[in-house]
Image: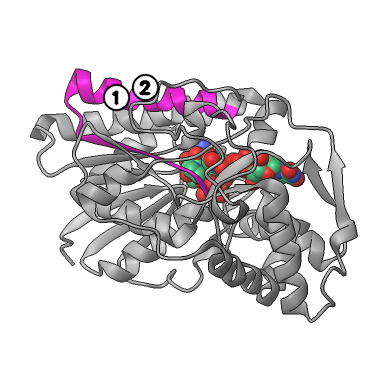
Amino acid sequence: MKYERSIIITGGAGFIGSHVVRLFVRKYPDYRIINLDKLTYAGNLENLRDIENEPNYRFCRLDVCDLEAVTALMKEENVDGIIHLAAESHVDRSIRDPFIFARTNVLGTLSMLQAARLCWEPKAYEGCRFYHISTDEVFGALEMTRPEGGKDGRGPYGSKLFKEDTPYNPHSPYSASKASSDHFVRAFHDTYGLPAVITNCSNNYGPYQFPEKLVPLFINNIRTRKNLPVYGKGENVRDWLYVEDHARAIDLIFHRGTPGDSYNIGGFNEWKNIDVVKLLIKTTDRVLGRPEGADDDLITYVTDRAGHDLRYAIDSSKLKTELGWEPSLQFEEGMEKTVRWYLENEKWLERVTSGDYLRYYEQMYGAK
Ligand code: NAD
Ligand code: DAU
């Protein structure tokens, strides 16, 4: 079959990537969707069981750093679009092992950019698009000038928000590697004319997130009655967005965003970590039929994360004004959906936390 477009989505077996792959495979049957993923500990093909047999979908186990193999795949599939999500994504891991973050996030992005350039420069980039998924963490931390919050004790917790032109000021090895990759993307646009677009998104939550991140880790710990390790005093503020709303924004920006531009994506939804944790306990206990307050004693304050950014808050008004995107879910509603999903998918959680899914790959694809 001749496809209208042929798109590589890197990191498609991860949390956000799996939602983007699912959306594109289903919404665009005339597009060839190639999921390029190395399947690290964070990649899980079980996240895509429901679409893995669709005729327009293909999975390729590849490392984004493998320029030769990526270029060959692009030529074979006549690729005209790349949505680049593959990355090492967990801040705590970056503090323990920064080198893998530089390799995957910086060199891996450079390799994807170079592959795109090699394949597309000869045709003057006609009809091509490189979309790089980045994070709000590149902007550094905002001040908390209003610790009591706004109306009904919620955010905003300060007057400043991250805008597209906020200067980069990363603090963790993770955010430094993402900032560096963003600079390479801009450099390829400015130097070689690569039609590239970048988005910087806030904290995502929802189904299929690896349970090392706050939301799924804590739902799992409440479920199994384990301690909830809150870093510092739990005062840090994050801006939360339901993952399917992020995937919708990616679809819109991939098709209609302006090359050379960047867009902020966020929920206008600032929460202190401790309030997120209390909401998680309340929701999980209610869904499990436990009495209210039954698991409040699981909250355990632990040593703070090194270099822990105090507050992130995104101004996504450019995306709303230019492309009409808005988040669709209230936080409480999104959290309820999320909690229910993890509790209904205990097997997924258990296989991921036990590492069983990694043994499955070894049988299918050989040891890494
Ligand atoms: P994730 O850790 O869940 O998934 C990452 C995926 O990339 C995995 O499938 C993994 O196997 C794959 N991968 C890692 N190294 C690879 C390599 N060398 N070659 C090929 N594939 C490789 O990550 P996520 O949370 O879904 O984040 C996806 C992207 O979105 C990242 O670029 C991240 O920086 C960005 N982002 C994440 C959030 C968030 O809240 N999770 C928010 C904003 C931006
Ligand atoms: O802001 C976007 C970023 O959001 C993405 O770029 C990252 O890929 C993604 O991992 C996420 O980073 P965070 O560090 O904000 O997410 P995490 O879930 O690790 O932590 C959320 C907050 O909760 C943070 O302030 C640290 C705190 N925390 C986290 C864990 C895992 C705890 O207090 N205890 C914990 O055990």
**Which label number is shown at residue 183?**
2
From the top left corner, tell me how far across and down residue 193 is, in percent: 16, 26
User: Which residue appears at 84% of the width and 66% of the height?
Assistant: 224
Mark 2 CB lies closer than 8 A to ligand 1: no
Q: Quadrant of the N terminus?
A: bottom left
The boundaries of the magenta stretch are 174-203
x, y percent for residue 106: 46, 25
Instruction: Confirm whether the magenta stretch covers residue 8.
Output: no
Q: Front-most of 269 and 289? A: 269
Q: Position of residue 355 (x, y in %)?
A: 74, 55
The numbered mark at residue 347 is: none
How crowded pointer 2 is (Cα within 10 Å; few <14, some 14-19, many 20+) is rated as some
- Residue ID at (74%, 58%): 278
In this orientation, does residue 288 appear?
A: yes
* Amino acid type at image mark 2: His
The answer to whether marks 1 and 2 mark residues whose Cβ atoms lie closer than 8 Å is: yes
Task: Give the image location of residue 190, x and y in percent.
Answer: 21, 20
- Name the residue tied to disc 1: 186
Question: How far apart in space, not on screen, are marks 1 and 2 (Cα)?
Answer: 5 Å
What main secondary structure does the magenta stretch of the protein show? helix
Determine the residue located farthest toward the right in the rendered image: 297
